[in-house]
Amino acid sequence: MMRMIRKRGRVLLLALIVIGCLLPVLTAEAALRRGSKGDEVVAVQKRLKQWGYYDGAVDGVFGAATERAVRLFQKKNGLQVDGVIGPKTAAAIGITLSGSSASTGAGAANGDVYLLAQCIYSESRGEPYKGQVAVGAVVLNRVKSSAFPNSIAGVVYQRGAFSAVDDGQINLKPDDTALKAAKDAMNGWDPTGGCLFYYNPDKTTNAWIRSRPVVVRIGEHVFCK
Amino acid sequence: MMRLPKKIWLFGLPALLLIGFAVLGASYLKQRDTIAEQQRLLTAQTESAYRALSDDLYDLSVALSKTEAASTPARLSKTFAEVRRLSAGAARALSLLPVSYGDDSGLMQFLTRTGDYAETLLDRVLNGQMLTEDQLHSLSDLRACCSDLSKTYDGSVTGGSFPQDTDFYSGETNEENLAQYPSLLYDGPFSESSEQAEPQGLSGDLIDETEAMRLAQALFSDRSLRFDGRTEGTIVTYDFSGDGGELCVSITERGGELYYFMDKPTGDRNDPPSDAESERLHASASAYLKEHGFGEMEPSYAQYYAGTVVLNYAAVQDGVILYADLVKVYADRETGAVIGLDAANYRFHHRPRHVALPTLTEQDARDRISDALTIEAVSLALIPKCNTREVLCYECKCKRDETFFIVYINAQNGAEEEIFEVVNSDEGDLVV
């Protein structure tokens, strides 16, 4: 009998541990804390290092030194000082946590250029530079077209227009290449010859878009009017 | 150590497991509620936009009807301003709907052009002109169309039968739907004539790929270029690249002219250039333009970012600046060399212009500038109102305290065509 009770005790303990592990997953927001690892930690360390909060190695491991830097950053920026990067701290640092809806801080960049860069980055970051400018040019060609909204925000957020808005990738922080591509596009460089649409022929089954005459192909994207 | 009665274990284990599952269940329900709430919010927003569109279409039909009834310029201009505001509101509401709700891009185009048309007529009225018979007809067509649209949209609002959310551009062609909207004859930035305008800056024969390659290679004799394909745009080009895509070159099929080229800058400086550096970069850009046959060009504003300075040049004909014929020259901050040139606007527009003699003298133009401004320089310029219309103006560079303005006075009728403020940003001078 004793043995059986012990066994039941172990099962009980196991059940509690399982529930204990599941609970945070179900209720908590995504956050980076001591012990976290990966690309997001690298991004945080890079930023904190740039701004002089952190002098350790950029190794993607959230250790004691990173936590100290985060606390210092939170203190200096009027955030709750807990050493944990939740959505608010992440937004202040300018990164987006996977699984959270915090948007990136626009920083010093002009709002329109930044939004265009976000669109370019989320839609075409793997593309050649010319292909990234081309995506920006399509957005701007739409702004200039009578058939689309007449502002960058109107075009980017038009319902159903860009998949990056639907899946939330639009909130990723654009890199320097995307920012430069956005500025080149704003300056008028249009490698698409005036196109209003583009698609990846390997990923699109939409018959309507595939029936449009192709103007140019750059990288993986096909551009059409 | 105290021993717990055996019965506690016997009943305790299932009880604890039960609590565990209850917690799991509760959080699942909470999550489900949150998702349902967000879906309701989204639906509410969609329906709100749909109703706003329906209301604006109705108000728009009323405002258009009033333009037919108004007889004084004051009332007409107020009514046109109203049409503009309502068409912009309807367009904004439409952009918040999944595209298929708005049937297709035809409705967006209709709304944009209605607003654009109202703006054109507003200008006309403000300049003391009356509406023509044709314009009154167009207004009547627009009113009828808005009224029909409003009935359709209002019908589904009152019946509560909102269309189902479907895919973006689900495969319908929009050409046949376009037929239900009246076509408007006018010159504005969104007009059909402007959007379908043909390039006028290129002449000569069509060249083939081999010839284009020879021309591109002649410009970059020390680089090895490869042919990437053609761009079948408004202006057809042959595209080449070199050094793994770092250098891009496009040559026009008609006439074999340089359309654009872009190379990678050496550095990544973003700081403003000193006057001496700016002068050096301008000299380098001007020399490049001259060497490549661009004729007389006048530099205007400059921007700097990512190791580059972008210098804007406009063509000049008999002392008149042609702002449509724009060339952007990209110069490298480190080396001073020209590393990019975008002649898209120039190739589209550049041709000899017939410039009428101005009715106003320079002094007349100066007299029309606000007393609040100090005039620093005046010159003649042809400014584009859209792809198909240019206006001859006196370009007056003015200053008030530390703020710079460029005011354009129509050289024929004295109207203040445009006012730009020159904004000194971190990245150069911008006109807004």
Image (cartoon, rainbow, N blue to C red):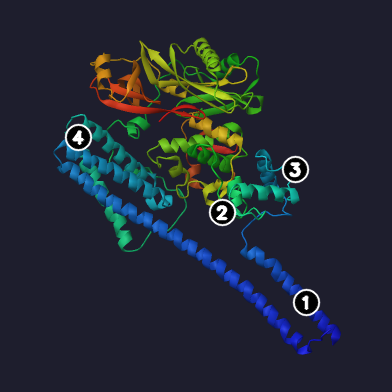
Q: Quadrant of residue A25?
A: bottom right
Asked if badges 3 and 2 are on one and the same chain, I answer yes
Q: Which residue is mark 3?
A: A56
Q: In this orientation, which residue lies closer to the viewer: B349 or B403?
A: B403
Asked if the residue at tag 4 contacts the one at tag 2, i.e. Cβ–Cβ closer than 8 Å, the answer is no
* Residue drawn at point x = 44 percent, y = 14 percent: B297
Judging by the rendered image, the residue that carries numbered circle 4 is B134
Q: Is residue A131 above or below residue B104?
A: above
User: Gap in Å between the C-alphas at discs 2 and 4?
Assistant: 53 Å
The nearer-to-camera label among 2 and 4 is 2
Q: Are marks 2 and 4 on the same chain?
A: no
**Cα separation between marks 3 and 4:** 74 Å
| Chain letter behind tag 2 | A
The reply to whether label 3 and label 4 mark residues of one chain is no
- Relative to B187, is A88 above or below? below
Please say whether residue A225 is visible from this viewpoint: no
Query: Which residue is label 2 attached to?
Result: A101
What residue would you read off at disc 1?
Answer: A11
In the rendered view, would you say B317 is above or below A155? above
Q: Are marks 3 and 1 on the same chain?
A: yes
- Secondary structure, mark 1, is helix
Residue B8 is left or right of residue B413, and the answer is right
